[in-house]
Structures are given as structure tokens and as C-alpha cells.
Image: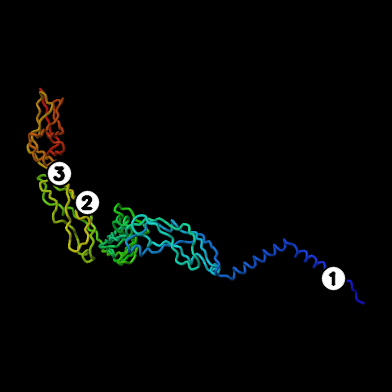
Amino acid sequence: MMNSRPTRNNKKKQGRFLQAASRLISNRVFIAILSVIAAIIIWGIMMSSDGTLTRRKVFTSVPVSVTGETTMISRGYIVTDNILSMVPTVDMVIETTQSNYARANSTSYNPHFELTQVTGEGENTLSIVYSSQAYGQVISCEPNTITVHAERYITRRIPVLVTPVGDLPEGVYLKSYRSDPTYLSVSGPISIINTILRASVLLDQSMLSAERMTDRLSLSIELQATDGSVVESDKVTVTNQSVITSSVIVETELIPVKSIALDGREFVSGEPAEGFELTGVELGNDTIHVAAAQEILDAITAITTDEPMSIAGATEDVTGYVRLRRLTGIESTLPTEMAVTARIAEKTISRTIRSVNITAKGQGGSTVTLSPSRINVRFTGPYTKINTLAAGDISLYVDVTDLENGTYYLPLEVVADNLSEYTAEPDDTIIQVVVKTR
């Protein structure tokens, strides 16, 4: 037999639920809340389904670009400021339709400064421009303008200067070097371009090949101002026949070098004054380096001069410069002139003075007999002194002071007046002396 109590309990629960629901529905607060929720739901459905409704969208830190530079330059102007460093990004607010809200992004607008807005030299105010506003209008942008400075845009031709630096490989000489091109064009603001003097290129000679003897190098250029300083600016363009470049080609040619010893006697001419002689010639360099083709170097044995320094009649050292003879086919003779010093000295001569009297010194009242009483003396010394020496300028004597009677052998003393540097060689250096006192 079935139990009927669960049925009665379910009915009681249903009744209580219906009574609670009836009370909730009749409550005004509940009705108000339910109405608001319903309105929001309905509004959301309408917004999502109506594409004509508009909404605002914010973009922050949008990158800025710059356009129109080529057109501006074609009109003869250039902006000297770095716009992107002044305004790298902007903040934008757009108003777009509900249907385009998801599509709209910052790249669609591409905010940029258009340089075609530049109208002349001096200050120019540029406004932000947008590539497209198809997804909605920009209603605000910060910043939206910038003030820049513009100058005239000019082009000048400047020479290329190649400067050799470093040491060449041993045994070679740099015969020639040239740049290709020899001139470049520089373009940019007039205030910078007018200060540029040349394009400098450093040629490192240590990198040249003594085996190939020729090289073709691509070398970087450096713009130099009239005061020698380096010009660096991203506003300056260097071109070669309208092609932007930062380097030039440098072609080099080496030739062999030979060291040749110089003979100093070949660089002087004439004879010194009588009694003087050339004792030596000193040159600025004992050897000289000559560069030429190998077959020419092999044929060279000496280098002299066509105009040697004259020492005719000289009584003292002579110093001067002589020009070296330049042989055919020689590319380099260094130096072209040579310092020359001719050393001139007085000759040393010998002369014999004959039958010079010998005297006794300090004989007092004694009788002195000398054997021999006359003698020949050979003098050696400076030419100007010896050549004019006479018998009267010479004293020969023996010293007999305080000697008693007897026979003595005494040394001969020689004195030459006004003669400081000399040697004397008498025929006899010991004289027999007989002393007799009274």
C-alpha cells in the first residue's frame, strides 16, 4: 500500500513558493531594479547592432614621422632641427562609429609633420597631418604643432685631399697617388655648407703592398672646415655624380728605392790659398735614397752636382748648399739640396835653417870654445810661421853657468821667437864645450 504523505508535502512547498513570488512581484523596489537591468540589456543589444552610433577612442604615445623632405629641398629649403627628437610621439583622441571601433588603430592615422608646409627661411610652424581618418575623426592631438627653423639648401663642389700617413714598406717609394673622384659635391644648410673646405682622406702607407707595387683602396672621407675642424651633421649629404657616398677610391703606385753613397770631394771645386789644404768634406747626408724604375737604379753608381761649392783661395772652413744632379728617370732624389762643409786647415811644413850660430849662456869672464859653433836646424810647423822664419828669429845656446875649467858635453837649447807650435831638429843635440877661467 502506497504512502500519501510526500504528495501533501510537495503541495505545501509549492504553495509557499507561489506566495513568496507574489509578494516579490508586488514589491516596487524589485520592480525598479528589474527595469534597470532590462534597460541595460536592451541598450547593449541596440549598441551592438547599430553601427551608426559613435564612441571615443584614445591612443597614447603614437610614433610621429616626417614626410615631404624631398619636395621641400626641391624648393630650396631644409629644416635644421631634429623634429623627431623634439616630438617623438603624440597622444590622440578620435571619435569613431561603433562599427569601426575595433578596426581603428594608431597606424591607420599615421600622424606626421609634412615639410611641404615650410614657406621660407627662419621660423616655420608645422601642424600634425594624418594619412587617413576613414575610421573616425581626430578630435584632439597633443602636441599638434611644432616650430622649426629652416635655411636655404645649397650644393657646393669641394676638392678631395689625400694625405699620406704612416711608414712605407722598406725599400719602396710612393711614386703617385690620386683619388677618384678628385671633387665631391656637398649639399645641406647654407650655414654648414659654406664652412666646408675639403674632403680629407688619410692614406695609411703601411698598408700598401711592396709586392704588387700598385693598390686600389676604398677610403672613408672626412669633411673639414676652413679652421681644420671636422664637420659632422646628418643634414649634410655627400654625393659623387648624384650618388650618395662616404668614401672615395685612391690609386697608388710604388717604385723601388736604392741607397747611394756620396763622395764629398765631388761637391767642392778649386784650391785653398797657398799654404792651406782641404782636409775633409762633410755632407748633410752620407747616403741618399733614390727612387726609380729598377733598370735605372741598376745603372746608377754615383750622384754628384753640376755646381760644386768653390773653395778657391779659402783660408778657413767653407759652408754652403749645392744642388744635386737629377738624373734622367729618377722620380725622387731626397733632399734636392745638400749641405756641404769643406774643412780647410793650414799646412804643416818643414824648413832647414843653415849655419845658425851657437852661443854660450852664463859664461861670465870665462873663455868658452864650442864645437861645433854653427849648426843646421830643421823646423816643422804652420806654413805661415815656418815659411817666414829667418836665422835672426832663432837662438841656439848651451848653458855654462858656474862651470869650472874643463871640457863638457852639454845639450843644445833651441828657441824660435814668435813661434809657439813647432818642432826643432838640430843636426847635433850635444855640443862639446871647453871652459877656461881667468
The residue nearer to you, when weighing 300 against 5, is 5
How would you rate the neighbour count of disc 3 (Cα within 10 Å): few for under 14, some for 14-19, many for 20 or more? some
Foreground tag (3 vs 1): 1
Count of numbered tags: 3
Q: Amino acid at mark 3?
A: Glu
Among numbered discs 3 and 1, the one appearing first in the sequence = 1
Q: Is residue 202 visible?
A: no
Residue 395: horizontal and vertical position, in percent?
A: 11, 33
Q: Secondary structure at mark 2?
A: loop
Residue 2: horizontal and vertical position, in percent?
A: 91, 76
The residue beneath circle 2 is 284
Q: Amino acid at mark 1?
A: Lys
Q: Please state if 329 lies on the left or on the right of 45 as rendered.
A: left
Residue 264: horizontal and vertical position, in percent?
A: 18, 53
As drawn, the label of residue 11 is: 1
The residue nearer to you, when weighing 28 against 423, is 28
What residue do we see at 44% from left, 66% from top?
A: 131
Q: CA distance from mark 3 to mark 1?
A: 154 Å
Q: Please state if 195 lies on the left or on the right of 37 as rendered.
A: left
Q: Secondary structure at mark 3?
A: loop
Snapshot quadrant of residue 6: bottom right
Snapshot quadrant of residue 238: bottom left
What residue do we see at 22% from left, 62% from top?
A: 331
Query: Quick check: marks 3 and 1 in contact, CB under 8 Å?
Result: no
